[in-house]
Amino acid sequence: MLKNAWFPLARTRLIKPGKPISRMIDECPIVLWRDGCGTVRAMEDRCVHRRAALSTGKIVDGNIQCPYHGWQYDGDGSCVHIPSLGPGAKISAQFCVDSYPVVVRYGWAWVWWGDPVAADEAYIPDIPFLDPMQDAPGGRLTRFSYQAPQELVVENLLDLTHLDFVHGAIFGDPFGAGEEQILVDYTEEVITMTRISEQRLPPKAQAFLTKGKRQDIHQTMQIHVRSGVAIGVAWSTPPGWGVCLFLPNVPATPDRTYQEGLLKLIGPAWYGRYVLPWASRIVTFQDAAIFRKQVPNYQRADDPRADKSVPADAPGLRYRSMRRALAERQSIGDFSYATGWHGPDPADVHRVTRPA
């Protein structure tokens, strides 16, 4: 688990006044709630008294109240009221719940996982197709939990050649055609993959729109390696429209990753409203089916064989090496961000990137 990063744990519209919600990161349950001023707060979802889940409690006088014995905590995690002690009782400062820095941006609650002193809003990824000061527009994807490590889910997003086979009817062309380039740009923190594919047969789900014409497709996927946040931009001509994708890929446990992302269409509203949500659900279940059989093969401790790779795997291999390098740095206490860590703008889909 890489730390000192912002993780988008939930859309803020789901965190309603008086109704805490629960999430999980790195096997730690988190409660997200709003205090009396409406500010989003994040704390460990565990009362210090008898470990009841605070997310099943309620908000009282701007504090979150445990449902078991009524202990109340303020937004910083300090216990401010214990009913059994009576009014005005002095409460030990040790009676506190771990709290975490939170920033609301793009309509998500971003929680800092790591040293709170190092929390800096500048490390929140730029998402060029979303307004940082407003709630994200429509196009929300279904919240989905993959029974797979975050690393495999992220590598799947960098491997766009699998679209032709796993999702061929919706996004791909299993027969292939024309010239294709896969380019990679990267820093110590961010990897950007660009796939340029020309004169491809349109997938069945788009054939009625392209009227039999071949497609030119330009796809960019940017991954923030510490957090697993994925930002994608794709353009298809014909029909001449784009798809923008934001996927959090939060590592709930070492073997479970959940997404609660956003898909935004630059094109006909009816297609985005009716077709894309349906297609995205199918794609999610198709990937989950692959993971279900793939993960056990990676978990076999008695299998010494290494993966065999080809040039199209360059983005995934680069991601593996970047994640390994960050993990090694963090294992010796180096959690710093280097200058220029954020890499290229994912919206600049015409950028000429360097070969992998």
Image (cartoon, rainbow, N blue to C red):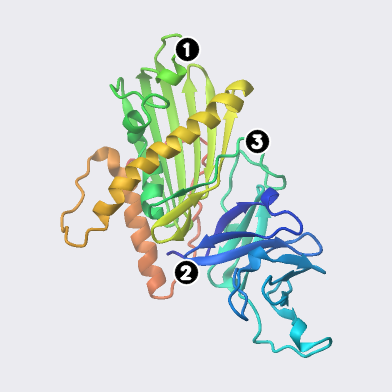
Residue type of the residue flagged with mark 3: Gly
The front one of 36 and 214 is 36
Q: Secondary structure at mark 2?
A: loop
The front one of 30 and 202 is 30
Few, some or many residues within 10 Å of mark 1 (<14, 14–19, 20+): few
Identify the residue at image location x=36%, y=17%.
201
Q: CA distance from mark 1 to mark 2?
A: 51 Å
- Return the residue at label 1: 208
Q: Where residue 130 appears, x then y in whole percent? A: 64, 41
Q: CA distance from mark 1 to mark 3?
A: 25 Å
Q: Are marks 2 and 3 in contact (CB under 8 Å)?
A: no
Which part of the image, by quadrant, shows the C terminus?
Answer: top left
Residue type of the residue flagged with mark 1: Phe
Q: Where residue 33 appears, x then y in whole percent? A: 69, 61
- Marking on residue 136: none
Few, some or many residues within 10 Å of mark 2 (<14, 14–19, 20+): some
- Return the residue at label 2: 335
Figure quadrant of residue 98: bottom right
Picture mark count: 3
Identify the residue at image location x=67%, y=38%.
137
Few, some or many residues within 10 Å of mark 3 (<14, 14–19, 20+): few
Residue type of the residue flagged with mark 2: Phe
- Return the residue at label 3: 138
Q: On the rendered structure, is 160 left or right of 24?
A: left
- The answer to which of marks 2 and 3 sits earlier in the sequence is 3
